[in-house]
């Protein structure tokens, strides 16, 4: 008999057994259903819904734009996807319940697009979203875009926001001055950028400083072949809305556009920046020319973070590469690359994996060995450039390739430099000094801004007497002189139609003081009662100077890059031409550099945007003579002795065969006899100009010339390369100079050249007399000045001897002065050449390694065998060039990432080709100093027995040349012989050439060509001449040996500093990275994507 307990236990066991059977049965049914579902899904295609406005995807007669169509067609070729197009009617009119069903949705905002409706559809159907919808609202407000970028630690330019509720609303926190705006105490100096807060408003403005000519450039969406316009008269910012102000980032004239497809893929393309000249470069098919470029590791990380921050898998954004760092300045949302089959392949493959991971993870997303659409895809034509060939110095075979062009250029034709000095006691001028020096009675004041100069002009106008005292007046001579100088100051300030500090500056320095009662009657205070006023003006680049510089740039484009021709433009636009342009601080030098760049790169429009975008100022390298001032004074004193005594002695190494070795070489033998003639003809010209100016009294100066002739606007003239015909026809001097200033110029020369009371000549005035004479002969020949031609001949004879000898009376002194003046410039030139060599060798070694690997890739041992020698060679080379490497490490070029063309996407046959160009624009002193080091460096005691870098034939030509005139230049080109072993010194050859600059022969002859050039007021530029014998071979190693003692060493070059306001954008904490990983909607698949 079974007990109750046993029965209960048996019943429990039975029930448990039945439950287990039921559970197993359900499990089997579930597995069966899952298997059936998977089998069904294998045959079912994933539906991709395209819910976008047709106007954004239409392209001519096609329904979808070329990139969208290309990518969707590739996706369908896999056989796993079906594409459904919603269309405008459904999107705008139908309820979301009637919209097509889809597994994955492509949707992005454009004008008129119902984004909220699309959000509702996504909430209802829950498709996988390629680009999240809610974050797209951020993209329409530039403030929110920058806030989101900063939140995720992505570098942006320094910026500040100005918010207005109504147009022209007064804001206490916003201040505008001539050359800056201030927002909440945050100051932005011009050039700065002004962007509307509304991201759909594409009218972006760039405001330029008065020191560069002023004005504003308006950027806009491409209209025809224009993307920007320059407005020289606009200097005040907009006030009708809300704007972002940000620091202008110099990018070398190139913008980079980045396109992401998911967080792990980014493609980048470079184009000419619209800030340069606003002309859109287009290919024969009418498409904007863009070239794919490689992103640096930091930029790739930025692309990933932009994609994650805005939750937009397919996203375009603008990248600014400036000062060795990169910044995001705009995020556009949905964007595809145009005209790149490789990109279409990549995008289709990345999107395929994205869709499969989201909707069919059980399916393999492995890319097949042969993409299904490759069979019928057309082959993209590849464009190439011819080999560089050899240079001017002989023929060295087709194995040579141009690697580097270093050019030092003197500025173009300019007006004579002028200076006015006078002691002032007038209360108005003394009060003006106190106004701008903070009320400090013993501090000097410099007036440069438009407001300051306008104040000075107002004060001067009130002080200048209404009529000139006649010669018979009983006024004292000092009073007459003072009144004339005040009148001259007034005329200079009125010259030009508006103020520009780059051309005129005034210094007020207190000389005497007195105690006066305070205005409140409480005690006394010190006040200045006399001050020295110094007005510097002139030295402005003329229309002829601009034309000369532009034409020389054009000549370089077509002739200095052998085998390239106009291909230089293509080389430049594809990141294979590394161009940097440096200028001294002087306005005429800066504008010469900008005009040259305009011709070199075939740009259009005004010079101001080109100057700000492409030219870097480096006054420490290209300005000043302070380091050699003592030696130059000694040279001038010795020169004065030689000229006035009429004797000359041979240098220790001098000989009849080498006349350039003589002290005072080049001076005319009858120099002492020419000086009285120079004074005589100078007086004659001065009297001629006085007669022209005598009737120009105050009323005539204010009314007549400028009522008839429009004011001479220097800002508008910055881009002019022709004469002001109206002024010439009216019988006025060329440019902005009136007869009063012209007379003041000649009268000062007459007085300074010869002191009658002491019967003493000042030979330092000879270059200034020659300068003024040459200027008037070229620009004011229509005035028919008596005695000007005779003066030019005498002044030229003397100046040809005086000017070269001011930089050293003999070769050894020339070398000493030259090494002090050009020391920094020489150091930088050697850095340029060494960097190019290192880069070329690295490319050659890498290419050799890749070739070896391609041939020997059958076994791992072979691979290791061919990579190890490369490593050893690299280390040995770095050891042998240890001193060069230390210099390179301090060079600003090495602080910057090496931006390169992306060879995988570029249609060029030679993506590895790379040419470095460095242009240095400077003044006469640096041209003479550099040339003196190059030709006399072997005279140094440490280099005894070495041959000169310059051959005897060229030394003789230089001796006879004497003057290195406007636009004279020295060119160093480095060629690489790719058939020579890497360690062979003959791998790199240096070619030295020079040009004398402006050709003066039209001023010396009277033929038809000379007459034509006289009418244009422009002298042609002489072509390059060799400094080496034909067939000679100067290696880089030999040049280093000869120049090293005179070049600034690496350790003396300070490392480039981070631009002010850029700090604080580059730190990324672990918490930030963790937040990035959590916010991305399909972050779980990121690791898989990266494998």
Image (tube, grey):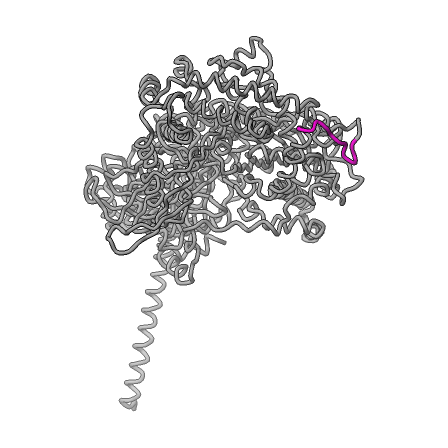
In this rendering, position of residue 224 left or right of residue 998: left
Of 107 and 899, the residue lying toward us: 899
- Label count reads 0
Query: Residue 848 location, x and y as percent?
Result: 68, 43
> Above or below — where is 794 with respect to 765?
above
Of 437 and 1077, the residue lying toward us: 437
Query: Residue 630 location, x and y as percent?
Result: 62, 42
Query: Residue 830 location, x and y as percent?
Result: 64, 42
Of 501 and 634, the residue lying toward us: 634
- Viewport quadrant of the N terminus: bottom left
Residue 644 sits inside the magenta stretch: yes
Picture quadrant of residue 973: top right
Can residue 619 be seen in the rendering of this structure?
yes
> Above or below — where is 263 with respect to 471?
below
| Main secondary structure of the magenta stretch | loop
Picture quadrant of residue 713: top left
Can residue 355 be seen in the rendering of this structure?
no
- Please report the bounds of the magenta region as a residue range: 643-654
Q: Residue furthest front?
A: 474
Residue drawn at x 77%, y 28% as measured from the top left: 658
Residue drawn at x 28%, y 52% as measured from the top left: 518
Residue 812 sits inside the magenta stretch: no
Query: Residue 312 location, x and y as percent?
Result: 36, 47
Picture quadrant of residue 699: top left
């Amino acid at each position: 008999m079974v007990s109750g307990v046993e029965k209960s236990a048996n019943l429990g066991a039975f029930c448990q057994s039945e439950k287990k059977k039921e559970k197993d049965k359900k499990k089997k049914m579930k597995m069966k259903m899952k298997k059936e579902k998977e089998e069904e899904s294998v045959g079912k295609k994933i539906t991709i819904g395209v819910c976008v406005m047709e106007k954004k995807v239409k392209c001519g007669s096609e329904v979808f734009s070329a990139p969208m169509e290309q990518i969707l067609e590739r996706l369908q070729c896999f056989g796993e996807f079906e594409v459904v197009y919603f269309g405008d009617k459904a999107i705008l009119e139908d309820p979301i319940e009637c919209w097509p069903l889809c597994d994955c949705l492509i949707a992005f905002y454009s004008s008129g697009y119902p984004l909220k409706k699309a959000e509702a559809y996504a909430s209802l159907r829950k498709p996988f979203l390629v680009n999240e919808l809610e974050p797209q609202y951020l993209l329409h407000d530039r403030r929110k875009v920058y806030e989101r970028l900063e939140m995720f630690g992505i570098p942006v330019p320094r910026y500040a926001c100005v918010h207005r509720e109504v147009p022209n609303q007064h804001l206490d926190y916003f201040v505008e001055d001539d050359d800056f705006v201030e927002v909440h105490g945050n100051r932005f100096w011009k050039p700065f950028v002004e962007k509307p807060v509304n991201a759909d408003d594409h009218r972006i403005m760039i405001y330029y400083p008065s020191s560069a000519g002023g004005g504003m450039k308006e950027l806009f969406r491409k209209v025809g072949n224009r993307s920007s316009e320059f407005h020289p008269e606009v200097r005040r910012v907009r006030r009708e809305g809300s704007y972002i102000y940000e620091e202008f980032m110099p990018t070398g004239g190139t913008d980079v556009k980045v396109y992401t497809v998911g967080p792990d893929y980014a493609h980048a393309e470079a184009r000419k920046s619209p800030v340069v000249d606003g002309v859109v470069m287009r290919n024969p098919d009418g498409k904007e020319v863009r070239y794919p470029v490689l992103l640096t590791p930091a930029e790739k990380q930025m692309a990933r973070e932009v994609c994650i921050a805005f939750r937009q898998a397919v996203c375009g954004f603008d990248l600014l590469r400036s000062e060795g760092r990169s910044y995001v300045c705009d995020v556009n949302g949905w964007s595809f690359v145009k005209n790149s089959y490789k990109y279409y392949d990549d995008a289709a493959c990345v999107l395929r994996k994205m869709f499969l991971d989201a909707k069919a993870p059980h399916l393999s997303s492995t890319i097949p060995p042969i993409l299904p659409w490759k069979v019928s895809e057309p082959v993209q034509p590849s464009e190439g450039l011819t080999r560089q060939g050899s240079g001017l110095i002989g023929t060295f075979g087709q194995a040579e390739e141009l690697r580097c062009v270093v050019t030092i250029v003197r500025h173009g034709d300019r007006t004579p430099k002028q200076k006015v000095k006078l002691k002032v006691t007038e209360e108005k001028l003394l009060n003006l000094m106190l106004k701008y020096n903070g009320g400090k009675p013993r501090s000097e004041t410099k007036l440069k801004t438009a407001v300051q100069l306008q104040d000075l002009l107002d004060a001067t106008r009130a002080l200048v007497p209404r009529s000139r005292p006649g010669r018979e007046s009983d006024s004292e001579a000092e009073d007459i002189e003072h009144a004339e100088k005040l009148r001259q100051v007034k005329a200079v300030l009125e010259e030009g139609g508006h103020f520009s500090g780059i051309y005129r500056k005034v210094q007020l320095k207190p000389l005497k003081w007195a105690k006066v009662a305070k205005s409140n009657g409480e005690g006394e205070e010190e006040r200045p009662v006399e001050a020295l006023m110094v007005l510097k003006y002139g030295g402005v680049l003329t229309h002829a100077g601009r034309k000369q510089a532009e034409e020389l740039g054009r000549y370089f484009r077509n002739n200095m890059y052998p085998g390239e021709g106009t291909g230089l433009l293509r080389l430049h636009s594809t990141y294979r031409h590394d161009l940097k342009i440096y200028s001294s601080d002087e306005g005429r030098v800066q504008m010469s550099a900008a005009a040259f760049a305009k011709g070199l790169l075939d740009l259009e429009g005004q010079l101001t945007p080109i100057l700000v975008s492409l030219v870097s100022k480096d006054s420490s390298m290209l300005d000043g003579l302070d380091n050699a001032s003592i030696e130059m004074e000694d040279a001038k004193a010795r020169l004065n002795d030689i000229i006035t005594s009429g004797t000359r002695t041979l240098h220790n190494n001098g000989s009849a065969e080498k006349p350039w070795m003589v002290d005072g070489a080049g001076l005319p033998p009858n120099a002492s006899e020419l000086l009285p003639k120079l004074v005589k003809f100078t007086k004659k010209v001065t009297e001629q100009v006085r007669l022209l100016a005598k009737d120009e009294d105050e009323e005539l100066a204010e009314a007549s010339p400028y009522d008839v002739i429009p004011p001479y606007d220097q800002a508008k003239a910055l881009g002019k390369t022709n004469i002001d015909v109206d002024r010439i026809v009216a019988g006025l001097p060329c440019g902005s100079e009136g007869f009063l200033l012209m007379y003041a110029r000649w009268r000062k020369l007459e007085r300074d050249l010869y002191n009658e009371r002491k019967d003493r000549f000042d030979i330092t005035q000879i270059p200034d007399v020659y300068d003024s004479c040459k200027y008037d002969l070229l620009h004011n020949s229509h005035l028919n000045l008596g005695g000007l031609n005779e003066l030019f001949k005498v002044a030229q004879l003397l100046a040809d001897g005086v000017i070269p000898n001011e930089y050293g009376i003999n070769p050894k002194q020339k070398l000493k002065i030259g090494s002090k003046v050009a020391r920094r410039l020489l150091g930088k030139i050697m850095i340029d050449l060494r960097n190019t060599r290192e880069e070329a060798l690295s490319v050659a070694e890498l290419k050799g390694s890749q070739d070896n690997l391609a041939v020997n890739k059958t076994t791992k041992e072979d691979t290791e065998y061919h990579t190890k020698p490369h490593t050893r060679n690299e280390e040995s080379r770095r050891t042998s060039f240890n001193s060069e490497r230390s210099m390179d490490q301090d060079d600003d070029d090495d602080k910057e990432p090496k931006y390169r063309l992306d060879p995988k996407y570029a249609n060029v046959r030679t993506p590895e080709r790379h040419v470095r160009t460095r242009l240095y624009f400077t003044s006469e002193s640096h041209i003479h100093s550099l040339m003196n080091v190059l030709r006399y460096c072997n005279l140094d005691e440490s280099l005894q027995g070495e041959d000169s870098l310059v051959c005897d034939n060229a030394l003789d030509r230089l001796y006879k040349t004497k003057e290195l005139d406007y636009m004279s230049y020295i060119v160093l080109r480095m060629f690489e012989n790719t058939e020579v072993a890497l360690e062979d010194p003959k791998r790199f050859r240096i070619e030295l050439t020079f040009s004398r600059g402006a050709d003066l022969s039209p001023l010396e002859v009277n033929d038809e060509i000379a007459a034509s050039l006289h009418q244009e007021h422009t002298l042609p530029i002489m072509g390059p001449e060799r400094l080496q014998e034909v067939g000679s071979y100067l290696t880089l190693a030999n040049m280093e040996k000869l120049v090293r003692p005179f070049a600034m060493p690496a350790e003396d070059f300070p490392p480039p500093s981070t631009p002010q306001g850029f700090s604080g954008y580059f730190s990324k904490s672990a918490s930030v990275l963790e937040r990035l990983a959590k916010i991305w909607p399909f972050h779980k698949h990121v690791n898989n994507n990266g494998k």
